[in-house]
Amino acid sequence: MPGFLLSGILAFIAIQLGKLAWMRAHGLSALTLEIVMGMLVGNTIYPRVVAGAASGVMFSKQNLLRLGIILYGLSLTMQDVADVGVAGVLIDALVLTSTFMLALLLGTRLFKLDRTTAILIGAGSSICGAAAVIATAPVAGGRAGQVTVAISTVVLFGTMAIFLYPALFDLNSNWGFIATNPHVYGIYVGSTIYEVAQVVAAAHAVGPEAADTAVIAKMVRVMMLAPFLIALSAFLMREKSKNIATHQHLQPTASKSIQALTKDQVQHGTNPKLTIPWFAFALIGVVVLNSFAWLPKPLFAAAIEFDLVLLATAMAALGLTTQVSAIRQAGIKPLHLGATLFIWLILGGAFINYMVNNSVH
């Protein structure tokens, strides 16, 4: 109970701060504020009470997180897909796939990051920022330090996008590099910027039409979180199977002790099984149900608010269990990867938007 209450109090404070007009104007959501507050308390007060609060914090970080992701589906409907059309859905899918594959490739091979950190940064950059990172962490087996590094990275570049994208729109309007309008710009923003709050802030700077289109495009991209988690789980399972198959075909010159150890690991459950993220299926179910407007408006509004509380509480628990030393140990490499993906989202995302819009229309 102490750990649960501590996480909940921090979540409440962050949610209230997130409602301030200045915070909204600068794209600072409750989740973004929560990770900062959680880390501040986690590296000062929390170590003194960790013995009595650890179990409650862990409950918040794991169980409440999954429930929050499921209820996140209340923000989405199948009608959102129809509103952006075939072009919008295809753009979202191509941006997501290309960004994540680039993160996995460059993160592990060029920047020499561990694969889990690369996966988390890739998920946050390609789908929906901090929410995607914390949703991907259970599937990828991410530790608190790795999750916080990934969230810090996507929050940094997402904040930069709020100010950069409107400037790019004005620059393009003056120079005419690409034929565009508020609707096209809205899809571009929704398909390439990280957080929903950041999308709203960047699109509103251009106009209400751009903002409406951007939010819908972003919601369709968020909806792709569920199939992404399922595909990621299958991919990781296949990679583990390949590793075990390699060990099973040890060279004859290998020591008998190593061969015996490998055989024992396979026989006693080391052979991996598919980790099914059931909460991803539940997320899809909630989206489908929400498409029929099955909840009365007052109950729907309360459920949305409750979901924000769940996610903010989970984020607070994550911050509480993250030590600053973990971020220092990660070094500059995550920022290098984040910066590379940020450039790709701006330039590569613009190219994808241009090609798809010209092909479809």
Image (cartoon, grey):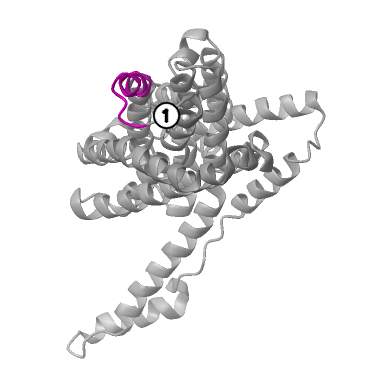
Q: Residue at x 48, y 29 (%)?
A: 186
Picture quarter containing residue 287? top right
On whether residue 175 falls in the magenta region, the answer is yes
Image quarter hosting the N terminus: top right
Residue 139 in picture, x, y percent from top left: 48, 53
Residue 313's spot in the image, x, y percent?
A: 55, 29
What is the magenta range? 165-178
- Find out whether residue 30 is within the magenta segment: no
Q: Position of residue 349 (x, y in %)?
A: 37, 40
Tell me what residue is drawn at x 47 percent, y 8 percent. Answer: 22
Q: Which residue is mark 1?
A: 180
Q: Give the number of marks.
A: 1
Q: Nearer the viewer, residue 318 or 111?
A: 111
Picture quarter containing residue 277?
bottom right
Q: Position of residue 269 (x, y in %)?
A: 47, 73
Does 175 appear above or below 246?
Answer: above
Q: Is residue 245 left or right of residue 197?
A: left
Q: Is residue 144 left or right of residue 347?
A: right
Element type at mark 1: loop
Residue type at tag 1: Thr
Residue for point 59% across, 51% down: 280
Q: Is residue 261 visible?
A: no
Q: Would you call the spot at circle 1 few (<14 residues within 10 Å), some (14-19), or many (20 or more)?
A: some
Q: Is residue 74 visible?
A: yes
